[in-house]
Image (spheres, rainbow, N blue to C red):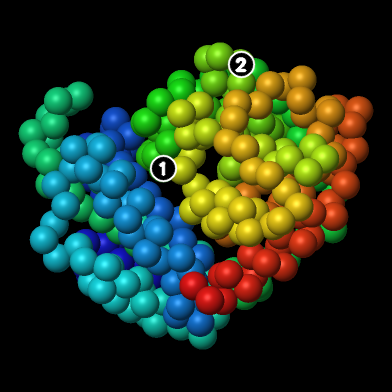
């Protein structure tokens, strides 16, 4: 079942117009949310990021879009799909209503919510070998728009095809200054000695929810220093550890980049702390 503008409908009955602006122009934003037993993980952070994204995209936020209303929409859909007692992945998509070309005729929005079951209620450390490479065919533009979760994901799609065709599990993408920005599906952290680096939002990386939570956790570690600073591709092979974060997987350690293989000791420690933080909300 799918929630389409507040109505729960079967997937075959959930229709969007071919002139939908999210499809025609990428005029849409979305949140990918992890839910466990009907508890929305980091809901306040997701809610405020969605509201901020809509404001930046000059969408009109409906008066009923309170945290309580949207939470009820999500939990109602979970129940309709029999997932109220399961871990689940929610995608909450907001699009501008159709009309106009590049210049929209309205700022009003529509939305839909989808739900699917996840395999585990906890963030797990995967044992599968994980190798990455740089994707250099196209670049992310540094700046505010690149920090949003919008439907403009052509670069991520092409990077994913490149990774698949060349046997990599993921790729890192660069901005116009040739700085490493993030992975195709998450934020990047680099560990060298007792210093942990992650690219700043001004470089164009996604303002990830898990990125924010990991920054909070790392700042409590007395033996480590966190720096939000541009990362050069040359630093990757000098790192002790690399890991990627997103709200569904949690923390994904990188095992290999080119000829360099990485440890995972800090990744394991952070994953344990992240699971505690997730349970506490």
Across and down, in percent, residue 72 comes to 29, 76
Circle 2: is it few (<14), some (14-19), or many (20+) Cα within 10 Å? Answer: some
Looking at the image, residue 257 sits to the left or right of residue 118; the answer is right
Residue drawn at x 23%, y 72% is: 69
Q: Which residue is mark 2?
A: 178
Instruction: Give the x, y percent position of residue 19.
Output: 22, 37
Q: Is residue 9 left or right of residue 98?
A: right
Determine whether 13 is above or below 162 in the image.
below
Q: Is 199 left or right of 62, judged from the image as shown?
A: right
Instruction: Report x, y in % for residue 119.
Output: 65, 71
The mark closer to the camera, 2 or 1, is 2
Q: Could you tell me how far apart the alpha carbons at marks 2 and 1 are, in whole angstroms?
A: 22 Å
Which residue is located at x 46 percent, y 56 percent?
Answer: 32
Q: Which residue is painted at 61% across and 16% down in the image?
A: 178
Q: Which residue is mark 1?
A: 149
Snapshot quadrant of residue 26: top left
Residue depicted at x 61% and y 21%: 179
Look at the image and tell me whether residue 63 can be seen.
Answer: yes
Q: Secondary structure at mark 1?
A: loop
Task: Identify the residue at the far bottom of this view.
Answer: 85
The furthest residue to the front: 222
Element assignment for label 2: loop
């Amino acid at each position: 079942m799918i929630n389409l503008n507040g109505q729960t409908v079967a997937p075959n009955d959930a229709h969007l117009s071919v002139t939908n602006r999210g499809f025609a122009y990428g005029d849409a934003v979305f949140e990918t949310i992890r839910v466990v037993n009907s508890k929305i993980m980091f809901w306040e952070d997701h809610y405020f990021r969605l509201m901020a994204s809509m404001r930046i995209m000059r969408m009109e936020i409906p008066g009923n879009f309170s945290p309580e209303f949207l939470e009820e929409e999500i939990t109602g859909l979970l129940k309709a799909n029999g997932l109220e007692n399961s871990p689940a992945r929610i995608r909450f998509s907001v699009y501008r209503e159709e009309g106009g070309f590049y210049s929209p005729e309205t700022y009003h929005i529509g939305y839909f919510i989808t739900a699917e079951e996840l395999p585990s209620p906890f963030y797990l450390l995967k044992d599968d070998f994980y190798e990455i490479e740089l994707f250099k065919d196209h670049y992310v533009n540094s700046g505010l728009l690149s920090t949003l979760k919008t439907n403009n994901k052509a670069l991520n799609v092409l990077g994913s095809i490149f990774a698949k065709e060349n046997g990599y599990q993921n790729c890192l993408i660069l901005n116009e200054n040739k700085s490493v920005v993030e992975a195709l599906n998450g934020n990047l952290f680099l560990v060298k000695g007792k210093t942990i680096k992650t690219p700043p939002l001004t470089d164009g990386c996604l303002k990830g929810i898990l990125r924010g939570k990991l920054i909070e956790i790392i700042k409590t570690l007395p033996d480590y220093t966190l720096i939000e600073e541009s990362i050069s591709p040359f630093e990757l092979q000098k790192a002790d550890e690399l890991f990627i974060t997103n709200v569904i997987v949690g923390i994904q350690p990188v095992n290999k980049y080119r000829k360099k293989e990485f440890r995972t000791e800090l990744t394991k420690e952070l994953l344990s702390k992240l699971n505690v933080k997730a349970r506490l909300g």
